[in-house]
Image (cartoon, rainbow, N blue to C red):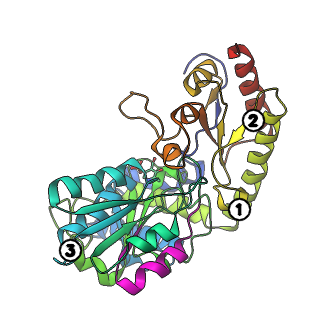
Amino acid sequence: MMTGIRTIYADYQATTPVDPRVVEAMSPYWSDSFGNPHSSDHAIGWRAAEAVHKASASVAALIGADPDEVAFTSGATESNNLALLGLARRAPPVRRRVLVSAVEHKCVLAAARALAEREGFAVATIPVDREGSIDMDALARQIDETVLAVSIMAVNNEVGAIQEVSHISGLLRPHGIIFHCDAAQAPCAMDMGSLANYADLISLSGHKIYGPQGIGALYIRRDLQARVEPIIYGGGQQSGLRSGTVPVPLCVGMAAAVDIVRSPEGADERKRLARQRDSFIRLLRDGRFPVAVNGPVRDRRHPGNANVRFDGFSAYDVLGSLQPRLAASTGAACASGVPEPSHVLRAMGLSEAQADSSIRFSFGRFTTDDDIEEAAYLVVEALESLAP
Ligand SMILES: Cc1ncc(COP(=O)(O)O)c(C=O)c1O
């Protein structure tokens, strides 16, 4: 926006700016090393294929997998659709049930709904508790040998709840149930080096981790790959799992982003973010308005996430009056432009009014201590101006 006023960005869970090191890593692949990685007849194609292979290795290393278990997609939305629709379309006749948590991203919920409405699957929703954690007893009650797959995210995009994936995996494995985990928000929130030991399919996204938009990945455990029907047909690239020319610059960018996030710098960043997030909440509480935090306690929460409720205020009014100085959001980016109460907060037991009073602030790599102070000041000032 060309207002001349600086905007503090506190919406890193919606998307992240691309890290300058990622831009640099990508730059040779636009016009110098521009080959089609599937051109197997010449050296330019071979070099592009080598870059894609290296990128798969980085992404695989993030979750403790092998490069041939990773397929690049256009983002986590596509990965989630490929996982759920793909598994369902090759499901054995005895497994016609799919379970999803109540706090999944809309793309998982919508794909599951399509399975119910168009493909004859029985889809059930697993509830969460007041903090957004999966109700393990409810999950345990639902599972048996008729369930094909369970889809539960690693880290929630609205309240930052980190789920206990090892516990979930332990419940599912004895029944031969496939565990799909949407980990789009996980790399900046937790060490996920052993996630592939627990989840059978894992969705990732480039633009949540300081990589480019338009690229994601789906990990599919090697022995399950034959059980996934593609949702895009074509030249049979990526072992037939996802046809279409693989976008080399985007893959290289996603891999560079992954390499940063899984380096010691990633762990330091998580610590710094938790400190900044806590200080933001403390500063808000210094104001005269009651401030409630939605979601789990500190160590089971995305370190950059503060989902805060200002009872008696409309989140839209607060966000509106903060423009253009502070960018935060009500939670999931709303594609339709029609505001609706957050399904995540409602599933956690909040009333519609409480959900409508909640704002997600999410901090990230380029957030400074000054940003935190100024952001808190701006929010308190906005509340003052809106208070009756
Ligand atoms: C948990 C989660 N899953 C999936 C997505 C969709 O990711 P993409 O934008 O890469 O399609 C998002 C993005 O908002 C997300 O936060």
- Disc 3, ligand 1: is the CB inside 8 Å? no
Identify which residue, 57 or 176, lies in the foreground: 176
Magenta residues, as a range?
162-180
> Is residue 24 toward the left or the right of residue 279 in the image?
left
Is 170 included in the stretch rendered in magenta? yes
Q: Position of residue 146 (x, y in %)?
A: 27, 76
Q: Secondary structure at mark 2?
A: helix
Instruction: Report which residue position mark 2 lands on.
Output: 371
- Residue 235 visible in the displayed image: yes
Vertical position of residue 231 compared to residue 365: above or below: below
Q: Residues within 10 Å of mark 3 (few under 14, many from 20)?
A: some
Marks 3/1: CA distance?
37 Å
Q: Are marks 3 and 1 in contact (CB under 8 Å)?
A: no
Q: Residue at x 55, y 24 (%)?
A: 316
The label on residue 91 is: 3
Q: Earlier in the sequence, mark 2 or mark 3?
A: 3
Q: Earlier in the sequence, mark 3 or mark 1?
A: 3
Q: Position of residue 315 (x, y in %)?
A: 58, 28
Q: Residues within 10 Å of mark 1 (few under 14, many from 20)?
A: few
Q: Earlier in the sequence, mark 2 or mark 1?
A: 1
- The residue under label 3 is which amino acid type? Ala
Q: Which numbered disc, 2 or 1, marks the residue closer to the eye?
A: 1
The label on residue 299 is: 1
> Is residue 10 toward the left or the right of residue 88 in the image?
right
- Residue 65 visible in the displayed image: no
